[in-house]
Image (cartoon, grey):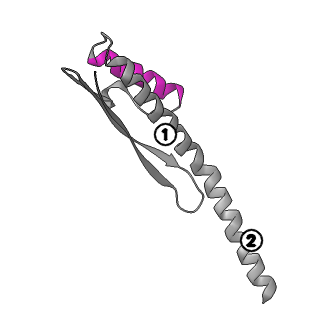
């Protein structure tokens, strides 16, 4: 009985490590993309790009990070001194028993000084 408990505990640890191995890259990529969105928004607040051009810049970075986004899914709004950028996307995690999707939202609002 004691060996069965130990085997069960080991199985739980192995499954947890496997799930972390599958899920963590998606969270790390989202962190990188969110950081890029925020830093680039500071630059674009003072830039001369149009809203579609800004969306293309973000779509290109998303493609570099293997994030399933197109320019039409990236919402850019430039009103006066405010620049708002927002987008949502899902990442499919394929695990043997129960595949699932993770939902991510990258957004920022930047105001010129």
At horizontal 71% and vertical 75% (from top left) the residue drawn is 9
In percent of width and height, residue 101 lies at 46, 51
Image point 33% across, 15% down: which residue? Answer: 53
Question: Considering depth in this image, is 53 or 84 the residue closer to the camera?
Answer: 84
Residue ranking furthest to the right = 3
Is residue 60 inside the magenta stretch? yes
Task: Give the percent coordinates (x, y) of residue 78.
Answer: 23, 22
Q: Quadrant of residue 86?
A: top left
**Marks 1, 2: nearer the viewer:** 1
Question: In the figure, residue 77 lies in which quadrant?
Answer: top left
Q: Identify whether 43 is placed above or below 84.
A: above
The magenta segment: 51-65
Q: Is the residue 101 above or below the residue 48 in the image?
A: below
Q: CA distance from mark 1 to mark 2?
A: 30 Å
Residue annotated with mark 1: 30
In the drawing, what numbered circle is on residue 48?
A: none
Q: Nearer the viewer, residue 11 or 48?
A: 48
Tag 2's secondary structure?
helix
Query: As rendered, which of 112 and 43 lies closer to the eye?
Result: 112
Instruction: Please tell me how many numbered marks the rendered image carries.
Output: 2
Left or right: where 105 falls relative to 32: left
* Residue 99 within the magenta-colored segment of the rendering: no
Q: Who's the residue at 81% across and 83% down the image? A: 3
Q: Please state if 48 lies on the left or on the right of 66 as rendered.
A: left
Residue of label 2: 10
66 and 53: which is toward the camera: 53
Task: Name the residue located 22 percent from the left edge and 21 percent from the top edge.
Answer: 81
Q: Secondary structure at mark 1?
A: helix
């Amino acid at each position: 009985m004691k060996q069965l408990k130990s085997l069960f505990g080991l199985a739980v640890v192995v499954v947890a490590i496997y799930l972390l191995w599958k899920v963590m890259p998606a969270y790390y990529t989202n962190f990188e993309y969110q950081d890029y969105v925020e830093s680039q928004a500071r630059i674009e607040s003072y830039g001369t790009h149009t809203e579609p051009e800004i969306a293309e810049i973000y779509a290109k970075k998303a493609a570099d990070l293997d994030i399933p986004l197109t320019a039409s899914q990236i919402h850019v709004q430039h009103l006066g001194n405010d620049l708002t950028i927002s987008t949502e996307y899902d990442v499919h995690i394929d695990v043997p028993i129960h595949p699932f999707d993770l939902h991510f939202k990258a957004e920022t609002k930047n105001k010129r000084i």
